[in-house]
Amino acid sequence: MTGSAVSGHRHAQLHRLHTAVLDRACATLCLDVFDTVLWRRVPRPTDLFGLLGARLRDDGRCPSWVTDATFRQLRIDAERAARAQGDALGGEVSLTEIWRAMPLSLFRDTTLDELIRAEVDLERAMTEVDLDIAAVARLARRGGIPLALVSDTYFSREQLAQLLDRPELDALRGARIFRSQEYGADKSSGLWDIVARELGHSPERILHVGDHETADHEIPGKLGIRTVHYRRLDEDFSRMLEREQEPVNALGPTVTGLDQEHGDFGLTSMRAKVLQTGGRTTSSATGTAWRFGAAVLGPVLTGFAEWVALRAHAAGLRTVWCPMREGELLSELVNNAADARGLAVVAKPVWLSRHVASLAALDCTSRRAVQEFIRGRHLLTVRQLLEVLHLRAGEIPHLAAELDTLLDNRQVAAQLGVALTETPHLLNRLRVTTTAARERLLKALRDAGALAGSELPLVDLGWGGTIQLHLARVLRIAGTGTTTTGFYLATDARSARLYSAGLRAEGYLGQAGHPREIVGVLARSPEVVEQSVNALCGSLVDFTDDGSPVLAPVTATTSQNRERRSVQEGVLTFQRYWNRQVRTATDWPTLTGAARPRLANILTAALKTPTTDEATLFGNWRHEDNFGSTVVTRILPDDLAPAIPYLSPADLGDLGMRDSFWPGLLAASDPHLAAAARAISAGAIEPAAFEPAGEPSATTLRYRTADGEWHDGSSRRVRINHNGLSFARMDLQTSGATHVSLAVPGRPALVRVDWIEAATVTGGRHEVLRWQTPADFAGLTFVDCAWLGANLIEFHSPLAAVWLPLSAEHGAPATSVRITAGFAMLPRSRSGLGYRFTPAGPITRLGAIAEHVHRSRGIAGLLRFAARALLRRIARVR
């Protein structure tokens, strides 16, 4: 994908402007100044006041106890007071009048003129020229169309001239200037009448461009002036900014983390500008995808690419290598960044994957290493694993009965590791496989030119640095003399393996798991970042003998590929606009230092609290295990979709990676759950607010094995969400479970059990058992609890439990079990006092069971059931 692929996103307003100017359809072109001709490198104009306070404090001209937030509020109050004074011309004031309303006694040894000059100088430093509007101004000047500036401003003519004195705005020299402070009226209260009168044209001959809905669009429009609404913030972007709101300063509502020299590096204004260039292409889904790329991933990956180019340049690395499938986009971004900054660094994609690198690096002499290799492929069957290792089933006869067994737990992996390494013949066969895989990988790297130097720098998203670790081992075994270096978006705690091996691995947003609040979110929900960056092809599963890549089939749908392409187009659009500023603006900042926490906040906020549109889009995307497995699932798991009404915010944190790749996406599917999650994430409310009052309880799981022994399993805290519902999910890995005991409320309670589901692996097969009807519950065993009929159960003690039969359905114990339950709980006194309900009688229970048998086994099954029940009755009588 190249920059030309995104050039079709034409700014509609700019197109109208160019057409009007070229056709000489206006007699005068009027331009608003702030957020049109100039935009600021801060999220809000008043954020400049906090930066001004910091500058004055650092210079010793402001007391140390006046914080940024305090100064900001003083400056806001001073402007309000100045406008309220009776001598203000029409309510309009000058900057001098505003500063006279400040408590000047705080600023000792500093004159009023010096304070005013400090503010103007800061405005000059923190404003940038809108290059698109500057181009329109030049086009108008060349066409002989007069220019005028219309601004609601407290700056004097001289001060405004200082702000506009830039080479890019030469076309504005000599333009008529209409300032609200000079005329004593702003755009909403008479300034437009003055403009129309003094320009001497009929209103329809005037074309105005500005950002404000009312002042620049509605009011002049009512006078007949034609307008182009050059909007800065739309509703979607405003919602993005709301979710990114950083912690509020305790002393005032100011945005924290602004850099004194660069503000927010122009990120807010740049993102707003890019979002106005397009993205609503053929459907709302592709539009959402484009906006996510332009406003979320675009800034982050643009910064990452700049950082990689600058780090590589500083280290004297001329070429960096970007593993596929991410490498196609990442190499383009790095090359664009290097070109814009004038750095002699080239990025190239290279075919690598975790699966291929780990096989080539496998130490067959270490049983532990073989077992770890097997555990990484938990979704494979034994048969598929043997295929990966190029082994035939006949070579391991004792595995003949296990070929369809899933690698679903550590015990199975451990047993299989022993089976594969217990004879010299098998060890030799494994060595042949790994040696051949290593040679194919090395040939591919040599042919690409990646082994030409002493260092092989990798550029990747990161997380655990698995590819770099395995590749370093491969290169060391082969004696290439080449070592690996890694430049990553972020690395989690697993990357400590790289440092222990003496390898260099740097992270842009986080490194070795720190900062935890950033890396934790990225490592927990990496799916959308990885999917969005991937090329539209299958994953690498092997190389041919001549070094050509062997790719798995493409599993994404046509619509998902179209949406991923839109995300990537959005990313490249942002970078294109950013690099245009790099090449044009004087001393344009990099995103390699103080900007990183702000970029991290943009990305983590999107992962923690995606919008409903984003949830709808990404929830349908498919996930590939990409570790030798062909299993494909949806990012929003099908089995959890019905559980969403039962979830509380804390339940999202309990979900494991195999439960949900992106818990925030689950929350976004329910507006109330999403609101609660946002409130907790923003620190506006404590998580305990969504917990049941009083002593906590937990849903507890125990299991029985074939020998009749009971064993402890796991537990989950019982919570009650905004719907009054509760959820529990627990995993179990064992050599074989015949029954599960489930203490649903973990306390005395009346419980409406809506459903219990057991997803099991039995005899190598995935099976799902579900209990949700009265007949389902009637056939269960109740220990210290009573079935009341329908789906109501009264639990009498903390250990009261329902027994779920697993082997009864399958005839064999389950080696892996995932229990999920949705229920509603009415707590009862732990004292045991109080009324107890009457359990359902035998007739009710038999009737429910008979209904179930008839439904599942027909009339013949029902007759057999009735005969057995009669025989048991006779036996009890005797």
Image (cartoon, rainbow, N blue to C red):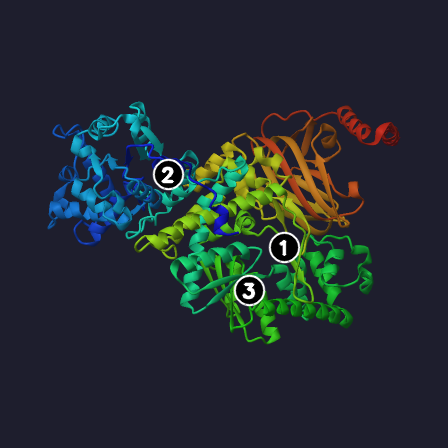
Task: Tell me the tag on residue 539.
Answer: 1
* Amino acid type of the residue tagged 3 in the rendering: Gln
Q: Which residue is mark 2?
A: 18
Residue lying at 57% horizontally and 46% vertically, measured from the top left: 661
Task: Name the one closer to the observer, 287 or 630.
Answer: 287
- Observer-side mark, 1 or 3, equals 1
Q: Position of residue 847 (x, y in %)?
A: 78, 25
SS at mark 2? helix
Q: What is the quadrant of the C terminus in the image?
A: top right
Q: Are marks 3 and 2 in contact (CB under 8 Å)?
A: no
Task: Give the alpha-carbon distance from disc 1 to disc 3, as whole Å.
Answer: 17 Å
Q: Which residue is mark 3?
A: 468
Residue lying at 42% horizontally and 36% vertically, measured from the top left: 12
* Amino acid type of the residue tagged 2 in the rendering: His
* Amino acid type of the residue tagged 1 in the rendering: Ser
From the viewer's perspective, tell me whether residue 320 is left or right of residue 701.
left
